[in-house]
Image: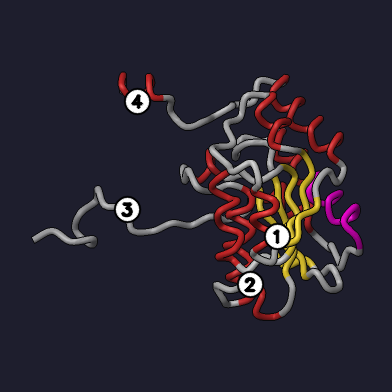
Amino acid sequence: MSDARTNPELATRLSIELPSWATSVLGGVGPLAGDDRRMALVLRLADAAATNTHGGPFAAAIFRADGGGLLSAGVNMVLASRAPVAHAEIVAIALAGTRLDTYDLAREGPIELVTSCEPCAMCMGSLPWAGITRLVIGARDGDARAVGFDEGDKRRDWAARLQARGIDVVRDVRRAEAAAILRRYAERGGLIYNGRTPAERAGA
């Protein structure tokens, strides 16, 4: 009888590690005060991601809201890991859980997610479960869609819904700079990958 140990077609392990170009950006980073400085770090990561092939031009980081201590950071790892869910926010959240040894990131105090672009539908859904208490955004959904990325189906009142769940939302921090990174990625011919359309699914 076949089981996970004898069935080579059954995937039983997932490992995601930040690439060296990302960790070099993060090296020696101490506490960062204020949204602008925290976003500046995230955008340095996003810009580095845009010139590499690990995924799209997206980055995120998780800080202690009180004091600005950096807990983790993530870049889009979809292409490198072949994991469709390895968006920058998901990677940052998963690494923060490992760092804090908990699935509830807010156990040790308020936790802030700073992201280079408004989270897609998938990443948006992860925020309450992760214990995020504050969300800081660079580029908007429309900036990502303008270069071809599909951000999924989100409620128009998503920000109010997060606020109702105790998650503060701050938008447009260094938005012009964040949107420019997306455009440069597309102009250089970076891969714009999205979910299949109904027609593509029918022809698969």
Give the camera-side residue of 134 and 191. Answer: 134
Identify the mark at residue 201; answer none if there is no mark: 4
- Quarter residue 32 falls in: bottom right
**Which residue is at a point 75% across and 44% down the rendered structure image?**
116
- Quarter residue 131 falls in: bottom right
Instruction: Say left or right for 19 vs 32.
Output: left
Residue 70 rendering spot, x and y as whole percentages: 78, 66
Q: Which residue lies furthest to the left in this view?
A: 1
Taking the image as drawn, is residue 6 in sight? yes
Identify the mark at residue 163; answer none if there is no mark: 1
Amino acid type, residue under disc 3 in the picture: Ala
Q: Which quadrant would the C terminus be assigned to in this image?
A: top left
- The kind of secondary structure element at disc 3 is loop
Instruction: Say left or right for 182 vs 194.
Output: right
Magenta-colored span: 34-44
10 Å crowding of disc 2: few (<14), some (14-19), many (20+): many
- The residue tagged 2 is 105
Amino acid type, residue under disc 4 in the picture: Arg
Residue 112 rendering spot, x and y as whole percentages: 74, 63
Q: Which quadrant would the N terminus be assigned to in this image?
A: bottom left
